[in-house]
Amino acid sequence: MASKYPRVQVTVDPALDEAMAAIDPHPKSKSRLIRDLALRGAEVAEVDRQRREEAKQTLRKIVNGEIELNLDAAREAWEERETMPCKQPPHHSRSSALPRTKMSSRRSMALFQRFRRHP
């Protein structure tokens, strides 16, 4: 079908084929499915970027003394975190080459709140 937008060619390698099959093994349009996967991946990448930026801002506040850090509680929380089983979502957009945390962001924040004290 003609389009005023540029087109791209995509090789459906085993990883992409697996991702596509997980969403819809027999799509009406593979192009539409790939587009939808790309858009969803962009959304997830943006959320990841925002979370990393929030984490950096929190660390800057700790370094600048805006947040007082209880190191004993931080060590305790870290040890608790390391004993928790790794929970991966059924689908994830990040490369397997990137490190994965062993707990959810919500749980990490709950532990952080335990050892964080405002001045």
Image: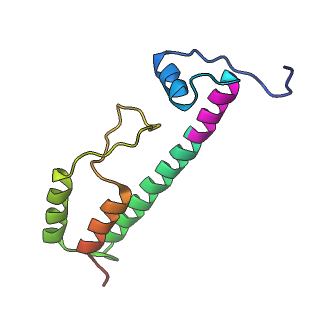
For image coordinates 43% across by 37% down, the residue present is 94
Question: Which is more toward the observer, 53 or 9?
Answer: 9
Q: In the drawing, does residue 75 fall left or right of residue 64?
A: left
Location of the N terminus by quadrant is top right
Q: Residue furthest bottom?
A: 119
Q: Which colour scheme is used?
A: rainbow
In the image, residue 109 sits, relative to residue 101, either above or below, namely: below
Question: Which is more toward the observer, 87 or 113?
Answer: 87
In the image, residue 97 sits, relative to residue 99, either above or below, namely: above
Q: Where is residue 96 in the image (x, y as percent from the top left)?
A: 36, 32
Please identify the quarter of the rendering in which residue 74 is found.
Answer: bottom left
The overriding secondary structure of the stretch rendered in magenta is: helix
In the image, residue 43 sits, relative to residue 30, either above or below, namely: below
| 101 is within the stretch colored magenta | no
Please identify the quarter of the rendering in which residue 31 is found.
Answer: top right
Q: In the drawing, does residue 56 fall left or right of residue 6?
A: left
Q: Position of residue 52 (x, y in %)?
A: 42, 53
For image coordinates 50% across by 29% down, the residue present is 22
| 36 is within the stretch colored magenta | yes
How many discs appear? 0
For image coordinates 21% across by 56% down, the residue present is 81
Location of the C terminus by quadrant is bottom left
Q: Where is residue 118 in the image (x, y as percent from the top left)?
A: 32, 82
For image coordinates 13% across by 70% down, the residue present is 72
What residue span does the magenta drawing correspond to? 31-40
Q: Position of residue 50 (x, y in %)?
A: 50, 55
Q: In the drawing, does residue 42 fall left or right of residue 55?
A: right
